[in-house]
Amino acid sequence: MDRTTTRSTRTAAALAGALALTSASALLSTPTASAQIPPPEPPSITTTVEGNEVTIDLVDPNRGLSHLLTACTAALVNPVKGVNLLPAIAAGTLPPISEIDPAVFEWGPSLLTTNAAVRERTYELGEIPSGVYAAVGFCINPNITNPSVDFEPVFVGGTIEVGSAVLDLGSAVVDTPGALAAILDLLGIDTGSLGSSVGSGDATVGSGDATVGSGDATIGSGDATVGSN
């Protein structure tokens, strides 16, 4: 096991421990039974990119006594490595954190969670390699198995690097059921305008003026095709 995987595994384990500690502390301070805890609402996240520096701002909407055991945090997912997660993320959920391969996270999940006293967090991710990512904010409590999720696409680097990353995504999603529609959603592309071609072997992602990033980063041309038979 390489150092990155080992570090990621330890981070995931520490995160689970931190969330458990938060829940235990809250249980000691309130008579509220876990059976009365409602499922958490997903957090709201916004991202800022300056060069290769990424910042995630997270707002946890879960307030009041019923959410004393709810905690939220953020992570940055590499969609190429985490292609199997894309349909779940697009649907607003995730598998249990303990079941996710830590290698799919480019950064995080952060151990700095929200809690009953602090419902907003800012995460400074530092230098991130150029590419396309999904910033993910998620909330859990003892009553749910699958975290509730908010996501936002993150484009790091210049036009060429982002364009290359989109092509890598195209080759990764073709053989994963539901992944093509999910990645279009993650990239903010209206799947309704693509009709029945989404998810099929001839699905075309780009159109003449399809713009995927911000600024001048234009991804896709008249012949931009992600999958082929």
Image: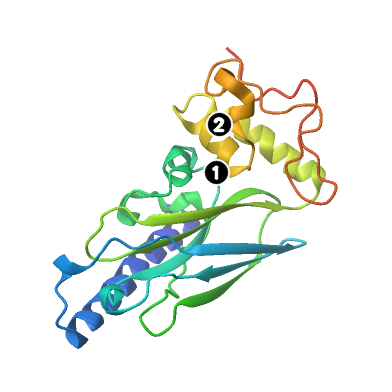
Helix, strand or loop status at disc 2: helix
Instruction: Report the front residue among 42 and 140.
Output: 42
Q: State how many labels appear.
A: 2
Is 26 above or below relative to 140? below
| Sequence-wise first label, 2 or 1 | 1
Name the amino acid, label 2.
Ala
On-image quarter of the C terminus: top right
* Quarter where residue 184 is shown: top right
Give the quarter of the image for residue 198.
top right
The residue that label 1 is drawn on is 79
Near-viewer residue (202 or 157): 202
What crowding class fits label 2: few (fewer than 14 Cα within 10 Å), some (14-19), or many (20 or more)? many
Left or right of residue 64: residue 37: left
* Residue 108 appears anywhere in the view: no
x and y, in percent, of residue 109 in the image: 46, 63
Seen from the viewer's position, the closer of residues 207 and 103 is: 207
Q: Position of residue 120 (x, y in %)?
A: 50, 76
Direction from residue 137 to residue 210 in the image, left or right: right
Q: Which residue in the protein does label 2 denote?
A: 172
Residue at screen point 45% across, 70% down: 60
Q: In the rendered structure, are the residues bearing label 2 and label 1 in contact, judged by CB atoms less than 8 Å apart?
A: yes
For image coordinates 31% across by 50% down, the residue present is: 99
The residue under the point 80% across, 49% down is 158
Determine whether the residue tagged by mark 1 lies in a helix, strand or loop.
Answer: loop
- Can residue 193 be spotted in the picture? yes
The residues bearing labels 2 and 1 have C-alpha atoms spaced at a distance of 9 Å
> Where's residue 67, x and y in %?
30, 73
Position above or below: 165 against 115: above
Q: Position of residue 190 (x, y in %)?
A: 62, 35
Give the residue type at disc 1: Pro
Point out the residue furthest to the right here. Answer: 216
